[in-house]
Amino acid sequence: GWLSGGGINDTGFMDFAGSGIVHMCGGVGALIGAVVVGPRKGRFDGEESFDPHSLPMIILGTFILWFGWYGFNCGSTLGMGSAAQGTMAAQVAMNTTLAAATGGLVVLVLRYALYRKYDISGMCNGILAGLVSITAPCGNVECGSAVLIGLIGALVYQGSSML
């Protein structure tokens, strides 16, 4: 990855694609924005659910992000000029796919078990939870660990969304 020459990785912290700083900045920025703007109008007015406005756009946006994630994660190999770099990019792509798919499927199954309906927007959020969860270790774990990381990301997302 881009930090293989030294720096924070020399301390034992392995951040393959630089996601620690990327997601920390994004998360802090989103938290500050949410505090400043406040909740959406009508979000907490009643017991009824707050349904998404356009499910096709949610799905399209999820797949656009998922596709772009391959450029971010696989692109962090910084080249494909050797067999080792190609192998690393393939492993990163596989781990990215496994974690995202696991995250989406786990949330879909959990929400079906809880609510007895298929929640596709929840599945899309589970996919994104899996993608975020795998970004830092994607070049340093095997495929079984990628599935476990996607599972944990989905459980954290589901638990957080139920608060």
Image (cartoon, helix red, strand yellow):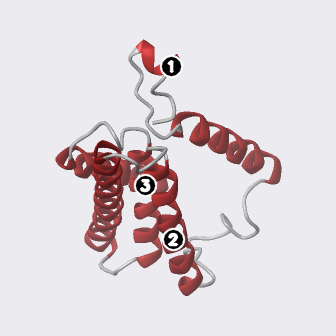
- Dot 2 corresponds to which residue? 62
The residue at the point 35 percent across, 57 percent down is: 93
Instruction: Name the amino acid type tagged 1.
Output: Ile
Residue 98, image x, y percentages: 28, 59
Q: Amino acid at mark 3?
A: Leu
SS at mark 2? helix
The residue at which mark 3 appears reads as 131
Marks 2/1: CA distance?
Answer: 31 Å
User: On the picture, is 68 further left or further right than 106?
Assistant: right
Report crowding for label 3: few under 14, some 14 to 19, many 20 or more residues within 10 A (C-alpha): many
| In the image, residue 124 above or below residue 23 | below
Q: Nearer the viewer, mark 1 or mark 3?
A: 1
In this view, the residue in front, 152 or 131, is 131
Which of the two discs, 2 and 1, labels the residue nearer the N terminus? Answer: 1
Q: Relative to 124, say whether 29 is above or below.
A: above
60 left or right, relative to 42: left
Q: Circle 1 is placed at which residue position?
A: 8
Percent position of residue 103, x then y = 34, 59
Circle nearer the N terminus (3, 2): 2
Foreground of the two, 15 or 149: 15
Q: Provide the secondary structure element on which disc 3 rests.
A: helix
Q: Quick check: can you spot residue 19? A: yes
